Image: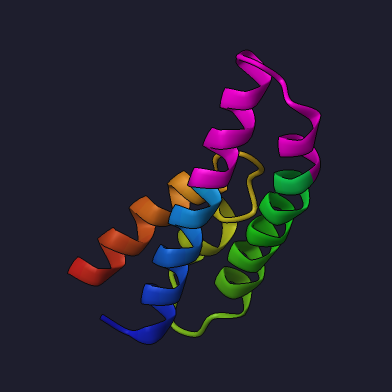
Amino acid sequence: MRPILRALEVLSVLELLSIAVLLGNLVTVHIDGVASLLGPVHGALYLAVAVTAVLGRDLLLRTRLLALIPVLGGVFTLINVRAEVRR
């Protein structure tokens, strides 16, 4: 696996975990500390995925564009990275 694809895969999984915890917190107990701590972390991970995908070499245009979609960008990037590994 190319290093760029591995980095995108790891960042996408981390972004998915952060949004899952944020949404789980919102639907259940809604602890303000969780949101104030994980909100910026999720934002940084989203930006890391987006910038890595846009600036990464030899990535499909589909991977680059779908990485920019908020909330679902991590899912789409993870799917596309796995498709690019098979390619």
Q: Quadrant of residue 68?
A: bottom right
Q: Examine the rendered structure and indicate whether residue 3 appears above or below residue 21.
A: below
39 falls in the magenta region: no
Q: Is residue 72 left or right of residue 47?
A: left
Tell me what residue is drawn at x 57 percent, y 45 percent.
Answer: 18
31 falls in the magenta region: yes
Q: Quadrant of the N terminus?
A: bottom left
Q: Nearer the viewer, residue 79 or 22?
A: 22
Specify whether residue 87 is in view.
no
Q: Examine the rendered structure and indicate whether residue 4 appears above or below residue 33.
A: below
The secondary structure making up most of the magenta span is helix
Tell me what residue is drawn at x 18 percent, y 67 percent.
Answer: 86
Where residue 57 appears, x then y in whole percent?
50, 85
Specify whether residue 58 is in view.
yes
- Magenta part of the chain: 17-36
Q: Is residue 60 left or right of residue 52?
A: left
* Furthest-top residue in this view: 28
Q: Nearer the viewer, residue 45 or 35?
A: 35
Tell me what residue is drawn at x 37 percent, y 75 percent.
Answer: 6
Q: Is residue 39 left or right of residue 75?
A: right
Q: How many marks?
A: 0
Where residue 15 appears, x then y in whole percent?
55, 52
* Furthest-left residue in this view: 86
Q: Quadrant of the C terminus?
A: bottom left
Q: Nearer the viewer, residue 54 or 27?
A: 27
Tell me what residue is drawn at x 61 percent, y 14 percent.
Answer: 28
Q: Examine the rendered structure and indicate whether residue 2 appears above or below residue 17.
A: below
Q: Nearer the viewer, residue 11 or 76?
A: 11
Q: Quadrant of residue 35?
A: top right
